[in-house]
C-alpha cells in the first residue's frame, strides 16, 4: 500500500511538473539543429579548379594538371580561422566543374590525376586533420551539378553522386554541415540532371546523422536569399518547407522566413570577404572594409542567423595576407564590442510562468543555455527591468529566445531610464536564437526590455549589453567621367583624409586630400581618414582605375536612338544605371565611341546596384571596330556566372589584346528569362 501511495505521489508530481512547464509553440528545432544554433561564425573556403582558371563557375573541360598549388597548407587555414574566432570550415570539395579535391573513385576529374603531389594529394584529408588539430568543425560543400562527368543527365549519375557523397562522409571523421548548391545546368552532353534530393539527403543521414544539411529548402538550414551577408530584420526560423525547393524563385522569402512555417529551417548567412567567391589577383585590394564586415556581423549573427564568411584561398594554397589582416581587425573589434555590462546585475519582471526559480527573471543573466525566463501562461506582453547599479554607458543589446520550445516574439523594444522616466532607445521585430540591437550611445542606470507582441508566452534565454567602440568610417573613393577623383568620409565629423598614388600605404604624414585629384589615364589611389587630432585612423582603402570615359560617347543602344539617359552607363557613377527594353529579334547592343584608338585588353560590366534584378546581363558578346562600321568577330563572349546572386563588377580580359576605337557590347541574355529590359550601371574597358 505504501508503494502505491509513493507511486501515486510520483505520478502526480510528474504531471504537475509537466503542467508547470511551458508547452512548445509551433515548429521546434531538432537536436542537430540545436547543436548548430550553438555556433555563430565559421569559414567558407572556395578553393578548387576555379582558383587556377580565374573563373567563378568552371566549365568541366579543364585538365586536372591545372590544379597545382605550390604551398598548400591547410594548417594555415585552420590557424587563421581559429585566431579569427571562427568555429569551423566548410570547403568546396566539388564545384560545378566536377573537379574533386580528394582522389575519388567515381571520376577522373580529381586530384588523383593532377601533378600536385604526384597525384597522391588529398585536400580533404589535410583540412579535416587541421580542423581536428585546431578544434574546428569540418564541413563540406558538394555541388550535384557536374559539367565534366559523362553520366550527368542520366539516372546513373544520381547513383554516382550518392557514392561520391559516401566517400566524403566516411573517410574524414565527423562532418558538421553538408552544403548543397541548387545550381542545375547542362553537363558535357548538353543534358540537365533531375536530382534525387530525397536520395542525397538519405545518404547524408545514413553516414553523418548529426550533420545539418543546407540548401534553399534545408531540410535543416536554409539560404538567406542573398550573397551580401544580410538577414532580414524580421527573420523567422520557420519555413513552409514543402513549398520551397533548391533554386526556389521567390528567394526573397528566404530572407524573412515564413511566420508560422511548418518546419524549423533557420538561416545561414553567407558572403565573401572579397567581391568574388574564388581567388582573383585583381581583387587583392578589394577586401571588405572593417565597418562593412562589422555591419554584416550585426546583420547576420545579430539577426537570428549564423555567419558563413568566405575566404578565397589563393593559388599558393594559402589564405591571402590581405584577407588575414581584415579578419584579425574584425576579431579585435568584436572582442572590444562584446564586453558584457549586464552580468551579475539585478533583474525583475512583471510576469513569470510560475513561482519556481526554474523560470525566474534572473535566468536571463546567467551563462547557462538551459535556463530561461518564462512569462505567465497566456501572456503576450511582458517586461524585464535590469538595474545596472550605477550610471553605465552602452549602445548594444543582445537578446536570445529559448528556441527549444519554438520562436515566439514578434515585437520588442528597449528603454533606458532617464530623469523623466523610461525612454525608448531601440526596437525590433523577431528575436529567435539571437538578436543584437544597435542604438546611439546612452548612459543610464536601468534598462527595460519590453516584449510588445508575442505569439505565445515569451521565453527569453539570455540578455547582454555592450558599449561597442566607435568605428572611424573608411573613406569612399570615386571618379567621375572626366577622371577627377574625390574622397569622402561619410558620417564622420571633420575627418582629415590623406592619400597616396604611388602604391604606398597612407599615413598621417601623407598628402592631405583637399581637392579632386586628376587620374584620367587611371592609376591606384589609397586613402585613410584620421580624427581626434590625427590620433585615430580608419582602415586604409584602395581604388584602382583604368582610363576614364572623358572622351567617350554612346553611339547607339541597338535600334534605339540613344537618349540622354544613356550617358549613365559611362558616367562613372555606380549608383546610376541605364535601362532599355529588349529588342524583339536581336540582341540589345550598346556601341561606344572611345574617342581615340586604345590598346584594349578587356572590358568591364557593372550591373545595377540598387538591389533589383531587372535587366542584369547574363550572356554577352563583345566586338571591336576601327571605324564603327566594320566589326570584328566577337573578341570575347561568355556568361557572367552567378551574377544574379552576387551582382558585383565583372572584369573580362580578351584572349589577345585589340587596338580599336569602337566597342560593341551585345546583351544576349539576361539573368531572368522573363525580363523585358536590359540594364547597365557602368561599361568600361581594360587597357592596363
Image: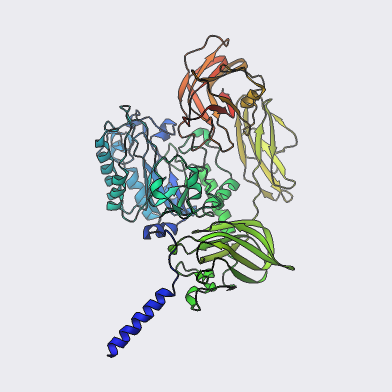
Residue 489: x and y in percent read 69, 42
On the image, the x and y values in percent for residue 517 come to 71, 31
Residue extending farthest bottom: 2
Query: For residue 146, what is the image quadrant?
Result: top left
Q: Is residue 248 left or right of residue 553?
A: left
The residue lying at 28 percent from left, 37 percent from top is: 112
Q: Of residues 635 and 198, which is closer to you in this image?
A: 198
Q: In the displayed structure, does residue 270 sit left or right of residue 524?
A: left
* Figure disc tally: 0
Furthest toward the front, the residue is 378
- Relative horizontal placement of residue 675, taking residue 183 as reference (left or right): right
Please state which of residues 236 and 444 is positioned toward the viewer in this rendering: 236
Q: Quadrant of the N terminus?
A: bottom left
* Vertical position of residue 489 compared to residue 387: above or below: above
Name the residue at 41% across, 56% down: 36
**Relative to 630, residue 517 above or below:** below
In the image, 33 versus 297, the foreground residue is 33
User: Toward which corner of the image does residue 589 lie, by quadrant?
Assistant: top right
223 relative to 194, above or below: below
Q: Foreground: 90 or 316?
A: 90
Decide if residue 521 is in sight here. no
Quarter of the C terminus within the rendering: top right
Q: Where is residue 174 in the image (x, y as percent from the top left)?
A: 33, 54
- Find residue 235 and report its horizontal and vertical position in percent: 51, 52
Whether residue 401 is visible here, answered yes or no, is yes
Amino acid at each position: 500500500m505504501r508503494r502505491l501511495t509513493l507511486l501515486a505521489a510520483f505520478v502526480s508530481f510528474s504531471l504537475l511538473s509537466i503542467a508547470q512547464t511551458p508547452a512548445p509553440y509551433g515548429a521546434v528545432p531538432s537536436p542537430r539543429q540545436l547543436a548548430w544554433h550553438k555556433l555563430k561564425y565559421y569559414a567558407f573556403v572556395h578553393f578548387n579548379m576555379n582558383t587556377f582558371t580565374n573563373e567563378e563557375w568552371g566549365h568541366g573541360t579543364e585538365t586536372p594538371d591545372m590544379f597545382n598549388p605550390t604551398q598548400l597548407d591547410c594548417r594555415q587555414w585552420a590557424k587563421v580561422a581559429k585566431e579569427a574566432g571562427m568555429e569551423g570550415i566548410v570547403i568546396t570539395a566539388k564545384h560545378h566543374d566536377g573537379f574533386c579535391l580528394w582522389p575519388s573513385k567515381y571520376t577522373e576529374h580529381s586530384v588523383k590525376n593532377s601533378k600536385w603531389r604526384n597525384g597522391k594529394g588529398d585536400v580533404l584529408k589535410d583540412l579535416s586533420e587541421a580542423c581536428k588539430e585546431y578544434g574546428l568543425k569540418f564541413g563540406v560543400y558538394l555541388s550535384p551539378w557536374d559539367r565534366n562527368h559523362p553520366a550527368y543527365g542520366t539516372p546513373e549519375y544520381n547513383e554516382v553522386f550518392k557514392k561520391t557523397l559516401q566517400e566524403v562522409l566516411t573517410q574524414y571523421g565527423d562532418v558538421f554541415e553538408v552544403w548543397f548548391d541548387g545550381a542545375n545546368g547542362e553537363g558535357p552532353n548538353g543534358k540537365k540532371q533531375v536530382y534525387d534530393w530525397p536520395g542525397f539527403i538519405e545518404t547524408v543521414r545514413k553516414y553523418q546523422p548529426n550533420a545539418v544539411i543546407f540548401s534553399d529548402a534545408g531540410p535543416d538550414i536554409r539560404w538567406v536569399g542573398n550573397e551580401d551577408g544580410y538577414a532580414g530584420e524580421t527573420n523567422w526560423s520557420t519555413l513552409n518547407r514543402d513549398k520551397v525547393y533548391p533554386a526556389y524563385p521567390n528567394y526573397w522569402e528566404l530572407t524573412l522566413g515564413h511566420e508560422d512555417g511548418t518546419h524549423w529551417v533557420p538561416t545561414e548567412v553567407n558572403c565573401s570577404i572579397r567581391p568574388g567567391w574564388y581567388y582573383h589577383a585583381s581583387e587583392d585590394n578589394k577586401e571588405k572594409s572593417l565597418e562593412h564586415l562589422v555591419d554584416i556581423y550585426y546583420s547576420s549573427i545579430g539577426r537570428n542567423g549564423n555567419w558563413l564568411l568566405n575566404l578565397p584561398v589563393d593559388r599558393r594554397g594559402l589564405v591571402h595576407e590581405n584577407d588575414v589582416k581584415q579578419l584579425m581587425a574584425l576579431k579585435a573589434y568584436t572582442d572590444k564590442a562584446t564586453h558584457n555590462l549586464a552580468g551579475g546585475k539585478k533583474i525583475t519582471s512583471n510576469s513569470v510562468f510560475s513561482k519556481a526559480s526554474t523560470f525566474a527573471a534572473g535566468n536571463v543573466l546567467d551563462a547557462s543555455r538551459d535556463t530561461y525566463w518564462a512569462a505567465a501562461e497566456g501572456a503576450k506582453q511582458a517586461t524585464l527591468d535590469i538595474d545596472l547599479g550605477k550610471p553605465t554607458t552602452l549602445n548594444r543589446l543582445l537578446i536570445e529566445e529559448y528556441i527549444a520550445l519554438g520562436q515566439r516574439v514578434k515585437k520588442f523594444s528597449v528603454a533606458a531610464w532617464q530623469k523623466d522616466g523610461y525612454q525608448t532607445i531601440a526596437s525590433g521585430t523577431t528575436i529567435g536564437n539571437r538578436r543584437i540591437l544597435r542604438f546611439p550611445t546612452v548612459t543610464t542606470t536601468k534598462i527595460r526590455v519590453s516584449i510588445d507582441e508575442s505569439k505565445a508566452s515569451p521565453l527569453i534565454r539570455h540578455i547582454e549589453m555592450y558599449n561597442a567602440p566607435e568605428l572611424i568610417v573608411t573613406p569612399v573613393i570615386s571618379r567621375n567621367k572626366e577622371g577627377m577623383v574625390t574622397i569622402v568620409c561619410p558620417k564622420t565629423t571633420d575627418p582629415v583624409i590623406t592619400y597616396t598614388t604611388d602604391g604606398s600605404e597612407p599615413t598621417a604624414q601623407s598628402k592631405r586630400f583637399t581637392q579632386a585629384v586628376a587620374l584620367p589615364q587611371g592609376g591606384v589611389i589609397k586613402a585613410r581618414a584620421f580624427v581626434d587630432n590625427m590620433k585615430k585612423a580608419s582602415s586604409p582603402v584602395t581604388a584602382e582605375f583604368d582610363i576614364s570615359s572623358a572622351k567617350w560617347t554612346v553611339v547607339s543602344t541597338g535600334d534605339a536612338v540613344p537618349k540622354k539617359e544613356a550617358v549613365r552607363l559611362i558616367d562613372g557613377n555606380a549608383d546610376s544605371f541605364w535601362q532599355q527594353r529588349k529588342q524583339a529579334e536581336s540582341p540589345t547592343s550598346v556601341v561606344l565611341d572611345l574617342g581615340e584608338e586604345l590598346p584594349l585588353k578587356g572590358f568591364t560590366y557593372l550591373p545595377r546596384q540598387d538591389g533589383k534584378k531587372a535587366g542584369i546581363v547574363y550572356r554577352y558578346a563583345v566586338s571591336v571596330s576601327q571605324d564603327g562600321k566594320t566589326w570584328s568577330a566577337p573578341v570575347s563572349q561568355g556568361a557572367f556566372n552567378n551574377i544574379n546572386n552576387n551582382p558585383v563588377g565583372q572584369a573580362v580580359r580578351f584572349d589577345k589584346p585589340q587596338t580599336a576605337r569602337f566597342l560593341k557590347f551585345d546583351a544576349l541574355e539576361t539573368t531572368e528569362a522573363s525580363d523585358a529590359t536590359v540594364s547597365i550601371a557602368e561599361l568600361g574597358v581594360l587597357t592596363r
